[in-house]
Structures are given as structure tokens and as C-alpha cells.
Image (spheres, rainbow, N blue to C red):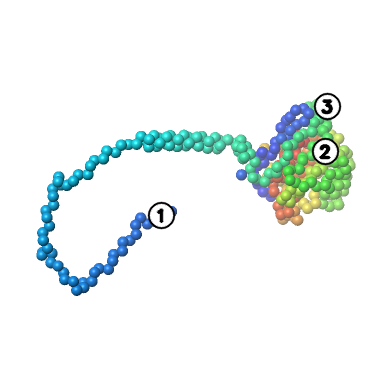
Amino acid sequence: MSEQTTPVDDVNPVEDAAPVGETVTAEDTAPTGAPISVGDPAPVGDGHPVEDPSAAPPLPPAPPLSALPQEPQVKVRKDRRVLRAVLRWTAAAVVFAAVGSAAAYGITGMERTDVPGLATKADGRWDYPTIVKPPLPSGSPGPFAESNKAGVHSADLRKLLLPAPKGAEADAALRGEDGWLAKKSFVAQYATKTDRDTVDQLLTDYAVRHVAARGWTTADGTHTRIYLLQFETAAAAEDLVTEKVAFYDSPQVALRGATTVERDDAFPERAAVDQITRYAYTESKPYGAEHVREAYLSAGDVVALVVQSHKGSARAIPFQQTVVLQSQLLG
């Protein structure tokens, strides 16, 4: 099964904009004393006579204490300047402590995105450019407006493709002719001849109108491909996905390099996008040459397929981020 990961938040969420377009906008201390060394005692019988203490003259009597010279009393005058300095530093320390405590409370009480410099955690998310929804033709409703019974996307399908993240290398093979990808190029990504024939026939039966695609490779070697297929109505697109291509546990056709997949449960609940149905899968272990992740999206009259692959293991976070952003563009 797939790995559980950190939920995807802060994925450059979609924001509504003006009618002409919508923005989807980590002492040692020394010993206190040394042992005292006692020297060798003087030798006994070294040739000098030992004097008799009784023969020594008596000592004079000690003078009375009152007769001893007295040390003059020095009156110590407190230096007011020192006291004032101490008071000033004490007051300053109290103020700094209070301010520091308030700042610490403010940061711990704020959301991570509210603290400058901490808006994006180092969790593997990609740096996408500002994402803008294309403007609708004058008088055309949105794909999920009440008046749009067919669920048609009136905007140019090519402009509904998610842009590549910053620093990624574009996949020229997916540009197609004038931005439109040939149906056979889309069909070619499926694993077996049987699967390719099945998909080709389905696209004919459901009368696919356009196929637009975009792909890129990031610096870590992750290869991303996004395909948008547009049909006559939302009913046709939804029926194709739910009845012929993707089921809850596994898709009915396999992509190259991912003949065995399982449902991807790593998506958090808040990654869901209104009006968009998502079927996400991840390749089952043991992986092949690359680990493949894929997701089918049903969005009105458009079916989207998002694929990410990486040698060894494809990370879940950028995959979730990419799927959510593409979903928001179609929403």
C-alpha cells in the first residue's frame, strides 16, 4: 500500500479573481587548590648543637590592647552613579524579558504561513509560478454554473493545463501540433496492445473532441505528464471514467511501467476539490524501473490524467500537490 505522508496544505490554492481571469494563486574548572608538598625534614645530628630553650632570655610582656595603635575608621560613601547604572540595567533586562516572552507567544500562536520566511515547509513541495485561470468568453458560464447543464469548459483547454514548476525542463514530446496532442500519442502511453486498442476505441465511441498535454522533468528526476481530454458533455466524460477506465480500487487499463497498481490512500480529506471526482493510484511493490503514480480526474466535460514517475520511488507530496492544483484549475 502507499505511504502515508504529510497532508498537502499551502499548495498555492485557487483564489477567485476579476471576471477577466481567476488567479489560482524549515568547564572544566581547574582544582580550587593544589596539594601542598612538604619538604624533607632536616637531618637529625647534622653537627650543630641543639640549644636549650631554658637558657634563652625571657620575652618582654605584651602591651595591653588599649595601647595598640588603632586603624582609622574609613567611612565608605556609596556611589550613587553605580546604583543608578545597576537600576537602569535591571529595568532594561525586565523590559527585554517581557518583549521576548510576548514575541515567543505571538509566533507560537500563529499559523506557520503567517510567519514570514516559514510559509513553505521543506516537505518536498514544488515552487509553481502564479497560476491564473484563463478568462471565459463573454457571456459564457463556468463549467459548474447552474445554467451550464452540459458542464462544458468554455475556456481554451490548452490554457487549463497546469504550468510546470520553476526550474523544470519541459517535455517537448507532449507539445503536439499547435498545443494539441494527437489521439494516437495519448493512446501510446498504455502498457499492452490490448489496452491501447481498448482506449483508442473508447475515445472514438465517446467522441473525444480535443487532447491537450504538458510534461516536465524536475531536477530530482521526477517525470510529470498531464493530459486533458475534452468530450461533448460532462455526462459522457463521467461515464467514460467511472464505467470504462477507473474504478475505486484499480483502473481497467494499465499505463506503461505500472501494470499492477493499487488505490492511493495518501491524499488527505482537505485535498478534495469541489465538483472534481478523483481516482488516484500508486504502483504496487516491487516497483519496476520506475515507481509510477497516476490519477484520473472527472471535471465536467473534461477528463484529466496526471502521471508522475521516478526511479526508485516517486514521492507522494509533489504528486498530491500537482493533482490538487490541476483539479483547482478545472474547477
Dot 3 or dot 2, earlier in sequence = 3
Dot 1 or dot 3, earlier in sequence = 1
Q: Quadrant of the C terminus?
A: top right
Q: Amino acid at mark 3?
A: Ser
Of 278 and 63, the residue lying toward us: 63
Spatial distance from mark 2 to mark 1, Cα to Cα? Answer: 73 Å
Label 1: which residue?
A: 29
* Image marks 2 and 1: residues in contact by CB distance under 8 Å: no
Please tell me which residue is depicted at 61% across the width and 37% down the height of the picture.
Answer: 116
Q: What is the quadrant of residue 127 in the picture?
A: top right
Spatial distance from mark 3 to mark 2, Cα to Cα? Answer: 18 Å
**Residue 293 appearing in the image:** no
Please tell me which residue is depicted at 83% across the width and 47% down the height of the picture.
Answer: 172
* Image mark for residue 158: 2
Of 137 and 307, the residue lying toward us: 137
Label 3: which residue?
A: 138
